[in-house]
Amino acid sequence: MRIVSVDPFYLRMPVVTDAADGTQDSFLVRIRTDNGLEGWGESDASPIVSLSVYCCPMSHGNIVSIRESLLGETLGGVEDIHRLHAKTLRNGLDIQHIHHAYSASDLALWDLLGKHAGQPVYKLLDGASATSHPKLPYASVLFGDTPELTRQRATDLRHQGFKAAKFGWGPMGKFGRENDVALVRAAREGLGDDATVLVDAGVVWGHDWQTALQRAADFAPFRPGWLEEPLLPDAIEDYRRLCTRKPAVPIAAGEGSGRYRDAEDLLLNGGVKFIQIDVGRIGGITPAHRVRKLAEEHGVTYVNHTFKSHLSLAASIHVFAAVEGFEILEYVMGGSSLSRELTTEMLKRGADGRVRTPERPGLGVDVSPAAFKKYLCPVRIEAGGKALFESAPP
């Protein structure tokens, strides 16, 4: 197959707020080939910033846009995806945002190759004989503004049949120790004694590993499965200090990894027990799968980070579908209508409450033409009176 078009798109809700909700807009890429196939991918990134990486004029040999690197290239096998990944990142060596922006293209290329080969992506990643294993979805929501609202949110999730849920961001860490404990207590009370409660601190303690260590002890009576991102993504030494002191709750982190090297450093040197990777940030499925293999080698649990649409969710589950021991799946609840409507199908929970990997060729989900048109924000970029970019037709 030869790549004939690489089309980036900006989708957004009519109103975007400052809430920690990454589903309010989206950056999509559609790649088409000369045999009539198309693949779709999504990045969890600023759409306009990402879009510029696709259309920026060449500055020199180390600043070449993603579209220029991919157009006209051939795609016939897994080796081509790895080759194009390396080529594009090398051509854009001095574009700091390139890994983040390229994530959408990498997803689209895997989608394309799966459709061409007639196989789901996880079989391309782990072999034709690979078997997918169902995952336990945890509902991913924000803390309520108060413990009472958090308790109600947890109760609602329990009534919806969720056996696990993660509560994050919001007021956590902002109003003192007593309020932090009250939030976690409320989550446990609402979700019930038998469910898994996960806590996401939203990097609120920065480099302050001592407070993170204390909060882990404070939260331990409520038996959370992990304390996620108590520190900033680059606070590797502070994560090491925290984790070597054996906190009362296991530490999870990794969603801020924008490159494979970031995740490698956190996993090998930070000491976390759970490594959480976002295929829409790290550069796509290709580096995420490398992190998954590294996690297997070092006895760390790989978990997806996904707070976008089910296009991203489908891409995420393929990465670790073949590993039975990695069974926890972040599952967005309460996202925007954009995130809920973007695909024509969703990864629904089965009768046993678990989510299964799509077995259709490619990623296994399709972008909804109606939703695409509804949320599309057309973009035109000019420089010196010349159009550098204009959104392609839907």
Image (cartoon, rainbow, N blue to C red):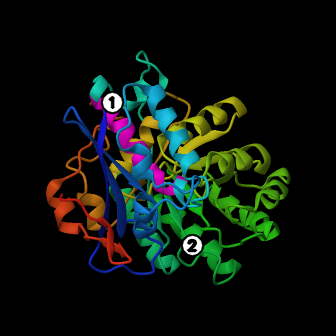
Please identify the residue farthest to the bottom as the structure is shown. Answer: 175
Looking at the image, tell me whether mark 1 or mark 2 is earlier in sequence order: 1
Where residue 225 sits in the image (x, y, percent)?
A: 61, 51
Residue 126, x across and y down, in percent:
48, 24
Residue 82's place in the image compared with 195, above or below, is above
Quadrant in which the C terminus is drawn:
bottom left
Between 124 and 38, the residue placed more toward the observer is 38
Tell me if I can see residue 225 in this picture: yes
Question: Quick one: 2 or 224, which is closer to the camera?
Answer: 2
Give the side of residue 80 with respect to residue 242, left or right.
Answer: left
Which class describes the residues within 10 Å of circle 2: few (<14), some (14-19), or many (20+)? many
Q: Under tag 2, what secondary structure?
A: helix
Q: Please give left or right for residue 115 compared with residue 188 in the image.
A: left
Quarter placement of the N terminus = top left
Q: State the mark number for residue 183.
A: 2
Circle 1: element type = helix
Residue 392 place in picture, x, y as percent: 23, 59
The span picked out in magenta is 99-115
